[in-house]
Each structure stands twice: as structure tokens, then as C-alpha cells.
Amino acid sequence: MSLLARLAPHLPYVRRYARALTGDQTTGDHYVRVALEALAAGERVLEANLTPRVALYHVFHAIWLSTGAKLEPRDGGVTSDDASGRLMRIAPRSRQAFLLTALEGFTPSEAAQILGADFAEVEGLIGEAQAEIDAELATDVLIIEDEPVIAADIEALVTELGHTVVDIAATRTEAVDAVNRKVPGLVLADIQLADGSSGIDAVKDILARYDVPVIFITAFPERLLTGERPEPTFLITKPFQPETVKAAIGQALFFHPRNAKQAA
């Protein structure tokens, strides 16, 4: 199989990553092109012990570092409140680890291979990025959950991250009423609610009026993963791991097109 054929499925994703990393598509594409040219000329090779996708990202980073490229904005500061602007305010090394895992879906071990770091360092970098995100995007949260113990657990996680739980709703009607009283910056929703109503319908009612990120936390993921409707970006299966919920909250707020604070 030719080099191009091996790498073609991964090129759109490494371009996406390069754009997020640099804050600019033209600059990102330049570094991707240089990496591909180096591979074609034999100046760089794909590591045989890595998967093709991991190896491609590893070469991209080797090229990036060899040029002495800077990740900081050329104009000396970033004021944008979109995801790109927020990314550029995260420390460079932490930004790389965060993007590789949160945006590109690599495991911390794969990110370590790409960055030429060890697992512990990458875990630390991800944690640093997550802390910066949590501090910047603190917002009001609506929890839609009919089990009091689970609702309390989620509330504790949300509060630990610096957010404020404005209401806990056990039914579709309660959820809609809660939003009418106070528009949240984030919704965490179960599917099956106390009176037999649906968290899916509650979320539809909310999104019909307000643009807020939503994370579904449910024991019934099959009700959402049907292929018959747009499926949620953030879906966590019960029983959940606290760190999974925390990571999803950070990513949902970070990559939502609007700053969560604007929804308040």
C-alpha cells in the first residue's frame, strides 16, 4: 500500500488538529504539508511500532518542533471567546495534550507517543488544561435527574469544578419550568424521568428556545444511539466514573460555539 493510501483517511483529522493547535487553517495546513513532504522525501518515516494515525501525528509534531514554531498568537494576545480563542490561552504543551485527547480522541498513552512524553506527564498536562478550562468557563448548571442519590452525586461533581447548580428537575415539566426561571449554561440530563416523561423531550423543549450544551447521563444509551436522529456529542452511560463526567463537562463547555457565561 502506498504512503498516500495509508495516510489519506487520517489527513482531514490531522488538518483539524493543526488548525486548532495554531488557531489558523492556513498556518496549520502549512505544517501538515511540510510533514507530508518530509515523509515523501524520506526525511521522516512513520514509526513501525505505532499505528498509522499515531505515527502521522508524531511526524507532524517532530516537524513542528524542528522548525521552532510558536503556538502563541502573533498579535500578542487573544480576546476571542470562541473555542479557538480559548484554546490559544491555554499553555502550549497542555494545549497539545488536551487537543490530542479531547478533540482527536487519542488515549493518554497514544498522546504520550505522539508528544514523545511519558504517560504521567501527559496526564498532568491534561489536568492542567482541564483546570484552566474549568476556571474560565464556570457557569450555571441544570441537572435533570429523578434519582435523588444520583442527582446529589452529580451536583457534588459539578460544584467541585466551580460551577453552580441552579436547579435539579425530576420531570420534563420541572425542567422546562426551571429553564424559564433561569437559563443555564449547561444541562446534564437523564433520559427516563420520575413521572414516565423523557429527558430527551425535555432537552428538545429547552434547545428549541436556548442554545446550551447538553450532556446525557443515562442507563439507556440505546434510546439515543439509534441512527434515526442527530445523536448527542456527549453521552455518558450509568454507572458513571466521576472523572468521565468532569472531562465531558469541560469539553462540552469548551467546544460549544458560545461561551457558556453568555447563556446566563
Image (cartoon, rainbow, N blue to C red):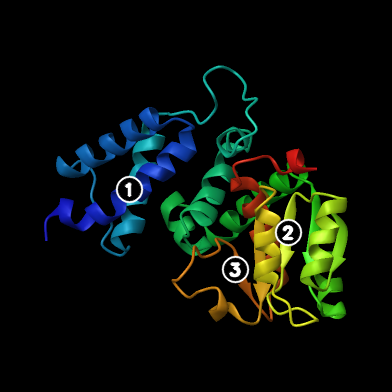
Mark 1 crowd level (few <14, some 14–19, many ≥20, 10 Å Cα):
few
Q: Is residue 250 left or right of residue 36?
A: right
Where does the N terminus fall, quadrant-wise? Answer: bottom left
Q: Residue at x 80, y 81 (%)?
A: 194
Mark 2 is on which residue type?
A: Val
Q: Give the labeled residue for mark 1.
A: 12
Q: Amino acid at mark 1?
A: Pro
How far apart, in angstroms, are the residues tagged by discs 3 and 2?
12 Å
Q: Which residue is mark 3?
A: 235
The structure residue drawn at horizontal position 55% and vertical position 60%, both measured from the top left corner, is 233
- Residue 13 spot, x, y in % from top left: 37, 50
**Mark whose residue sits in front, 3 or 2:** 2
From the viewer's side, name the closer residue of 198 and 127: 198
Judging depth in this view, the residue of 210 and 1 nearest the camera is 210
Estimate the spatial distance between the alpha carbons at disc 3 and disc 1, rounded to whole Å.
Answer: 24 Å
Residue denoted by label 2:
187
- Dot 2: within a 10 Å radius of its alpha carbon, few (fewer than 14), some, or many (20 or more) residues? many
On screen, residue 116 above or below 65? below
Looking at the rendered structure, the secondary structure element under dot 1 is: helix
Q: Which one is nearer the viewer's eye here, 59 or 142?
A: 142
123 is higher (above) or lower (below) than 209: below
Q: Residue 204 location, x and y as percent?
A: 65, 61
Towards the viewer: 118 or 94: 94
